[in-house]
Amino acid sequence: MKFYNRESELNILKRADKLKEKHAIMTMLIGRRRVGKTTLALQPFSTTKTVYFFVSKKNEALLCSEFSEEIEAKLGVKLFGEMRKIEDVFAYLLEHAKNEPFTLIIDEFQEFYKINDSIYSSIQKLWDKHKVQSHMHFIACGSVYSLMKKIYENNKEPLFGRADFKIDLKPLNVSVLREILQDYDSYTHENLLDFYVLTGGIAKYIELFVLYESLDAKAMIDDIIAPHSLFLDEGKNRLIEEFGKEYGTYFSILSLIASSKTSRVEIESILEKNISGHLSRLEHDYAIIKSIKPMGAKPNTKVQKYEIVDNFLAFWFRFIYKYNSIVEAEGYERLREIVSRDFSTFKGRFLEKLFIALLKEQQHYTNIGNYWERGNQNEIDIVAVDEINKKLLLCEVKLSKKRLNYEELVKKSVNLIGKYKGYEVEYRLLSVEDIESFFTQEGKGIGALK
């Protein structure tokens, strides 16, 4: 599978790499697991040599032995003596880079916490001492979001303020998903929606489905729910390490959000406990959920909902985690029946999310979101505001065009429009059939549709 998109991220890496001619440069590369950080870091953006370390859960001396072999192979040097500490390895590399510029990639950088958390202090001390004379581009990759944020953005940590560049790698956007489906002769607007729902733009999932030649909903679901499927334990594999011993509570919260219990009150009434701290950590420390407030609401409003950021995790918690007993009993056929029965309802809200993603790609609006009033009254699926040209776009979104109701949309918008006096208002009814219009109309955006 070819390498798609990532032009802006590659430009950052190229710029950072060129700047190492002046002095050592440090780049922080973070992103959720499977999003494609390692593939990006290993792209040929540099004309100099690259040394790649993967931090596995091993004794420090064993890691140093592996790293020494990589140094000899990639830099073409012969190491004499045995290095048993990461500090010694890093010191050697900074010294070597004074005479030969190169790129150093350390993957799963946060794992040093479990091996020897003093390593970060050692790296900071050596970096500050040798940075000016050295010509290394050091890329620190990490997928445990909370730990990487702590390492670089907590002012009490030794590497705080040391990164020269930061890349927070996001999933591939909808336009790229469309390009992939077209490249494999599988594009329809229905397939694009299903591909978006089940991959969320995560590179590893896309790569697997392309490998399996499974690019429609049935084929993808069959691969997800199958004996020995790599997807069945994906939620546990990605999140238990993040959450630690409290993972049970976090999983319960995420399962409820995936099942449309999206307000704190709803979740607390079911779990019978205060979860404000858990919600805050899920959003701000782990970046797994985000809070959504109605467009036009005051900043301090308590009216808000939560959604899982990652589409596949939403699917996993809605169907795999919820029906874990069926998975444990190897009732794959039964679970596929349940998913087939409920998938249309589940993916309906992702059509709204897909259209919002497409609107953001067009960059015609300064703010895009949802609107509702207390008690979930007068819900409007998409509200897009152009504060520069004083325009307001209101959209109703349904899977089936037959269920769209223009008069009802206008009626629900009365209170919202009052908050945007003097704005030109446009109403749009959107179904799955309208996806392609974002790519084919002149101007490539819903604002261009008349």
Image (tube, rainbow, N blue to C red):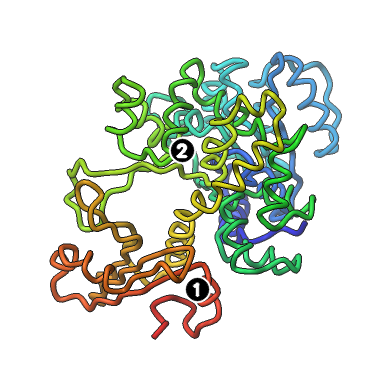
Left or right, 264 with reference to 246: left
Secondary structure state at the residue bearing disc 1: helix
Would you name the residue on which mark 2 appears?
A: 288
Q: Residues within 10 Å of mark 2 (few under 14, many from 20)?
A: many
Q: Could you give the CA–CA distance between mark 2 and mark 1, rounded to whole angstroms?
A: 29 Å
Between 89 and 106, the one lying in front of the other is 106
Left or right, 311 with reference to 352: right
Q: Are marks 2 and 1 in contact (CB under 8 Å)?
A: no
Give residue 259's position: percent from left, percent from top: 45, 39
Give residue 381's position: percent from left, percent from top: 35, 60
Left or right, 39 with reference to 294: right
What type is the residue that disc 2 sits on? Ile
Image position of 182 with respect to 162: above or below: below
Give residue 189's position: percent from left, percent from top: 59, 68
What type is the residue that disc 1 sits on? Asp
Residue 420 visible, this orientation: yes
Q: Residues within 10 Å of mark 1 (few under 14, many from 20)?
A: some
Q: Quadrant of residue 136?
A: top right
Tag of residue 119? none
x 75%, y 59%: residue:
2
Tag of residue 434? 1
Looking at the rendering, in which quadrant would you find the C terminus? bottom left
Between disc 2 and disc 1, whose residue precedes?
Answer: 2
Image position of 377 with respect to 396: above or below: above
Give residue 131's position: percent from left, percent from top: 56, 37
Q: Quadrant of residue 142?
A: top right
